[in-house]
Image (tube, grey):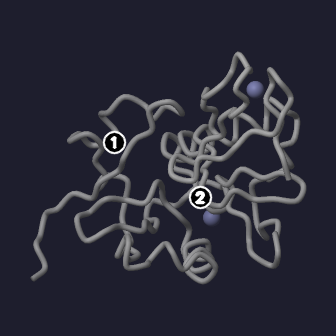
Amino acid sequence: MSVPCPECKKALELDQTSSRFYCGTDWCAALGMETPVWRALETSGLAAPNPAGLPRPLHWGLPVPWVAPRAADEVWWRALDARRLADAQNHWLCQGCGFALDDEAWVMATPEGQVLQAALHETCKDMALESCPHLSSDATRATPRLITRNQLFTDGRPVAHAAPSDPHFLHQWELEMTEQHA
Ligand SMILES: [Zn+2]
Ligand SMILES: [Zn+2]
């Protein structure tokens, strides 16, 4: 699967760390210019439908989260669609299925209280844990926590009192650390 550079039409390269495409063609005006995967797919017309709801579309037997950028034959599991993620954060939607959440929802949180992006329904959390082992890997040490929106902070403020999450400046949610578990 290759995504063409809008300028030189050669295949863009993927920076695995930032999950952004960039053009590596020496003579191209867009050389080195970075584009998030979801935007490059949209610009090139290669984005495949990834509608909200359950059951999720499958890719090689794995459920595709609502926030994952998707083309006909490829899913970028870690390159999240920032616009959908901002919607999920602002409107209390599930990042797994895109539907509205109840007052209580699940988040994956690190021991330091850093939330992995957004919240989930219980079924969607179970589905994510089953199909994305990296969510709870040694790297993140994240565990599921049942919370309400009032327990979430971003940039030191309750999310209800913070500026909305923006695709170019996404919230990093944190759990209020009211009690310390030894
Ligand atoms: Zn180019
Ligand atoms: Zn869901």
Quarter where residue 143 is shown: bottom left
Q: Left or right: where does residue 131 sit relative to residue 156?
A: right
- Left or right placement of residue 106 versus residue 78 in this view: left
Residue 173 position in % (x across, y down): 35, 50
Report x, y in % for residue 115: 37, 59
Assess mark 2: CB under 8 A from ligand 2?
Answer: no
Which residue corresponds to the image point at 37% horizontal and 53% vertical from the top-left?
149
Where in the image, quadrant-wise, is ligand 2 located? bottom right
**Left or right position of 167 against 8:** left
Give 101 or 130, whichever is nearer the viewer: 130
Q: Which tag, 1 or 2, sits closer to the chain's start?
A: 2
Local crowd size for mark 1, using a 10 Å CA cut-off: few (<14), some (14–19), many (≥20): many
Q: Residue at x 36, y 65 (%)?
A: 147
Q: Is residue 128 above or below residue 86?
A: below
Q: Quadrant of the C terminus?
A: bottom left
Residue 89: % across, % down: 49, 45
Q: Which mark is residue 78?
A: 2
Q: Amino acid at mark 2?
A: Arg
> What kind of element bears circle 2?
loop
Determine whether 127 is above or below 158 in the image: below
Which residue is pictured at 80% across the width and 29% down the height?
A: 43
Q: Position of residue 142 (x, y in %)?
A: 37, 73
Q: CA distance from mark 1 to mark 2?
A: 24 Å
Residue furthest to the top in view is 29
Q: Residues within 10 Å of mark 2 (few under 14, many from 20)?
A: some
- Check disc 1 and give the amino acid type: Val
Instruction: From the image, tell me which residue sits under label 1.
Output: 159
Residue at point 31%, 59% (across, down): 114
